[in-house]
Structures are given as structure tokens and as C-alpha cells.
């Protein structure tokens, strides 16, 4: 195998140089692809063709539909209902509002699929409420940010769809099921940690448990949670494709938000649509850019070279998986989530395949790694949203996040080295 070292240096050197000086990741990928294609002597039209090929597929329609459904539901009053339901379930515990925060994030994240939307929506309600109840501001904010990562794992997650399209040949239904148990596991771990913090700092309990209040809260929120059921049940049973279920979810979310809950006027739909378009334009540009960049990576055999390098460094599966996690965590401090998925998933997937790892398990590992990156400086988007909502400086929040990083890293290690956590449900329901 002939390795064009110069072309590899040009491709990766151009990309990382542009990212380092502040260039947008998509722009950096496209520029690196153009320069490398020119060096290789191929017509530059190939870059344009690969950009189009990157987003040319029926399955890609699922992404805009999922994003729009999440935007509609996160703007339509579902937050208050989910907080009320969570309070009825776990608010009676020591540190009850912290438990409510975590559980509400699990519910809300499953609807919106966005850690940023979760932090902005729930945080604007719960952080002031927790402070008023005697919780310190840093804990109130960090528990909000840490718990928001659950929504990236709990289905339906448009990031799982991006991952599925990046590697190809994996069932989106199995990915949805594979993310559910790790998402719940992460929530339980955060609850246990928050309970011990609450006991140590003597944070208050909530009201006593009431079955009547639980039933009322469940009745009020069940329609909002129906969005998740439509998508997950539809995809898992095979009644809908991921794209069809996402389209149905948009219609359902539209009806529930504007004609049942009616907490926002119908004219607000245009603002919601605009917000969805902004998010979608970034995602689709990244995917298109990754099509051109990924072609260069594949042509230059970079995945094979990296696999040989890692596997030649050590034969220990444990060490290799630790190195992969470390690489993803480092990238998470520098790049956005979608960027890491579209660039690194095709590169690392052949390596974990050689180790016998199922693509569903690797999907959960990659999503959680990227999620931790969202709350890690210097470019953690959720970290900046949490700072804006709470008014606490990023530097203070970063220090306060340290114990939460420890909890999340521990969960990541469990998911990495105990496949059954991820694979039990998909193997049971969709063998």
C-alpha cells in the first residue's frame, strides 16, 4: 500500500490550522478538501460533487424533522409540565429539586434531543427556583448542565441519526434503544451523586409524595411525552422509517403545542421555524463538508493507517478503548458535537469493529463523549448557555463541574467496558 504522506499532511495540516485560528469547522473541512484535491491533481468539481453526495439521501430528511419537532415542543409549554411531573415523582427526596432537575432533563431531552435547549429552557425555570429554595447557584447550574447530556442519549436523538448516517449500515431503531439504558443510567448516577451532596450541604426536601398529584401531573404531561413514543415505537416496530416517524412527530408536536396546550400563539411558529432553520443549516453544512472531507480521508486510507498505528501500539483492548475515549474527550474540548461525529465516526469505527464492538455500543460511547465535551471548556456550548442563564462566570462553573465530570467519566467507563448496558435492550427488542 502506497501512502501519500504529503497529501495527508496537507489535508490534516490545513484543517487543524484553520480550526486553531478560529475558522468554522465546516469551512475548514471544505478548504482542506479543496487544497488536497488540487494537490492530488483531481478536478475541483469532485469537491462540489462530494459536498452534494454528503447530504443526498432520503434518510437525511429525518434530521430536519427531528430538529423542528424538538424546537416546537421546547417552545410550547412542555417544560413546566415535565417539571411538575418530575416533582411529583422525586421531589420528596432530600435535595428534591436537584432530583427534579435531573429527571426533567431526561424527559425534556428525549423530546428536544438538544442539551443546549434543555439547559436554556429548564435552567431558566429551575436554577432560580433552586436558589430561592436554598441551593447554591453553582450547584444549581452544574446539575442542570450535567443532566442535560442525558437527552443526547435518550431517544429520539437526532445526533444518533447523524452517527447512523456517518458510518452507514446500522439500524436507527437499535441505536435509539441502545441509548435509552445508558441515558437512564447516567441520570441515576447523577441522582446518587446529587443526593450525597444534598445530604452533606443539608439541602431541603420537597413536599411529601402524593399519588393524586402524580396522576394529575402525568395526565397533563402525557401528550407531550407522546412525541417520544411515536418516534421510538414507530421506528422499533418497523411501522415507520426514521424519516417518516420524524415527519409524523412534527405534525403531532404542532397540533399539541398550538391547538391543545395553546401557551404560545400560532404566529410564534415562524420564529420557531427560523430557529430550527438556523440549527439545521449548521448541521447540514457540517454533513455536506464531511462528505468532501471524508472522501479525501478514505482515498488517503487514513482510517487504515490510524487503525494500524493504534493496533500496532498495543494489543490490549482495554488500552485501545481508553485511547479512543481520551481522543474523543480531547476533541470535545475543541470542536462541536456534530463535527466530531461526522469526522471521527468513520475513522474510528473500523478500529472498534476489529475489537468486536457493536456499532450500537460505539454510538452510545461516542455520543456520551461528545456530550461531555459540550460542558467542557473552552468551547463547550452548554457551559456558556449555563453561564448566561445563571449569571455565573464560566471559570467558576468549570471548577464546580469537576466532580460531575468524574461521575460522567465513570458512567462512560461502564458503558465502554460493559456492553450489556447498551446492548441488552436492542438485542431483546430488535435481535
Image (cartoon, rainbow, N blue to C red):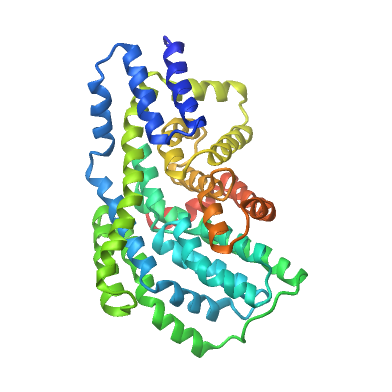
How far across and how far down the image is residue 385, in percent? 52, 56
How far across and how far down the image is residue 262, in percent? 30, 78
**Where is 396 relative to 288, above or below?**
below
Question: Which residue is pictured at 38% across the width and 58% down the height?
Answer: 156
- Please indicate, yes or no, whether residue 66 appears anywhere in the rendered image: no
Which quadrant of the figure has residue 272? bottom left
**Where is 264 relative to 231, above or below?**
below
- Please indicate, yes or no, whether residue 85 appears anywhere in the rendered image: yes
* Residue furthest bottom as drawn: 212
Which quadrant of the figure has residue 309? top right
Question: Which residue is pictured at 27% across the width and 66% down the height?
Answer: 269
How far across and how far down the image is residue 271, in percent? 30, 62
Question: Which residue is pictured at 27% across the width and 39% down the height?
Answer: 55
* Residue furthest top as drawn: 2
Marker count (numbered): 0
Q: Quadrant of the N terminus?
A: top left
Q: Is residue 385 left or right of residue 71?
A: right
Residue nearest the viewer, comparing 415 with 290:
290
**Where is 292 relative to 274, above or below?**
above
Residue nearest the viewer, comparing 356 with 262:
262
Amino acid at each position: 500500500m502506497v501512502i501519500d504522506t504529503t497529501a495527508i499532511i496537507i489535508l490534516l495540516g490545513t484543517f487543524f490550522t484553520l480550526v486553531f485560528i478560529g475558522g468554522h469547522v465546516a469551512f475548514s473541512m471544505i478548504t482542506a478538501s479543496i487544497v488536497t484535491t488540487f494537490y492530488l491533481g483531481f478536478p475541483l468539481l469532485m469537491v462540489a460533487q462530494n459536498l452534494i453526495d454528503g447530504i443526498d439521501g432520503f434518510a437525511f430528511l429525518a434530521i430536519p424533522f427531528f430538529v423542528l419537532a424538538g424546537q416546537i415542543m421546547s417552545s410550547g409549554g412542555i417544560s413546566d409540565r415535565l417539571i411538575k411531573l418530575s416533582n411529583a415523582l422525586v421531589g420528596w427526596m432530600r435535595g428534591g429539586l436537584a432530583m427534579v432537575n435531573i429527571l426533567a432533563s431526561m424527559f425534556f431531552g428525549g423530546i428536544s434531543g438538544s442539551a443546549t435547549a434543555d439547559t436554556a429552557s429548564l435552567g431558566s425555570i429551575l436554577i432560580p427556583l433552586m436558589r430561592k429554595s436554598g441551593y447554591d447557584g453553582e450547584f444549581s447550574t452544574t446539575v442542570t448542565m450535567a443532566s442535560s447530556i442525558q437527552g443526547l442519549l435518550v431517544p429520539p436523538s437526532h445526533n444518533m441519526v447523524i452517527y447512523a448516517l456517518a458510518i452507514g449500515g446500522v439500524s436507527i431503531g437499535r441505536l435509539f434503544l441502545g441509548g435509552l439504558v445508558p441515558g437512564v443510567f447516567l441520570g441515576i448516577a447523577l441522582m446518587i451523586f446529587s443526593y450525597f451532596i444534598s445530604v452533606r450541604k443539608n439541602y431541603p426536601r420537597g413536599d411529601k409524595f402524593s399519588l393524586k398529584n402524580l396522576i394529575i401531573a402525568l395526565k397533563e404531561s402525557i401528550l407531550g411525552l407522546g412525541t417520544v413514543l411515536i418516534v421510538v415505537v414507530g421506528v422499533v416496530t418497523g411501522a415507520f422509517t426514521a424519516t417518516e416517524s420524524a415527519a409524523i412527530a412534527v405534525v403531532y408536536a404542532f397540533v399539541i403545542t398550538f391547538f391543545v396546550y395553546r401557551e404560545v400563539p400560532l404566529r410564534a411558529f415562524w420564529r420557531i421555524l427560523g430557529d430550527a432553520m438556523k440549527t439545521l443549516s449548521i448541521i447540514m453544512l457540517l454533513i455536506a463538508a464531511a462528505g468532501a472531507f471524508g472522501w479525501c480521508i478514505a482515498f488517503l486510507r487514513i482510517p487504515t493507517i490510524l487503525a494500524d498505528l493504534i493496533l500496532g501500539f498495543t494489543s490490549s483492548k482495554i488500552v485501545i478503548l481508553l485511547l479512543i475515549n481520551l481522543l474523543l474527550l480531547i476533541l470535545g474540548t475543541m470542536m462541536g458535537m456534530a463535527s466530531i461525529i461526522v469526522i471521527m465516526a468513520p475513522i474510528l469505527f473500523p478500529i472498534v469493529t476489529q475489537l468486536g464492538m457493536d456499532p450500537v455500543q460505539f454510538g452510545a460511547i461516542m455520543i456520551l463523549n461528545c456530550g461531555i465535551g459540550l460542558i467542557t471548556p473552552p468551547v463547550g456550548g452548554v457551559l456558556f448557555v449555563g453561564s448566561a442563564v445563571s449569571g455565573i462566570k464560566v471559570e467558576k462553573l468549570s471548577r464546580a463541574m469537576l466532580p460531575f465530570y468524574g461521575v460522567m467519566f465513570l458512567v462512560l467507563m461502564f458503558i465502554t467496558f460493559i456492553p450489556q448496558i447498551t446492548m441488552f435492550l436492542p438485542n431483546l427488542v430488535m435481535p
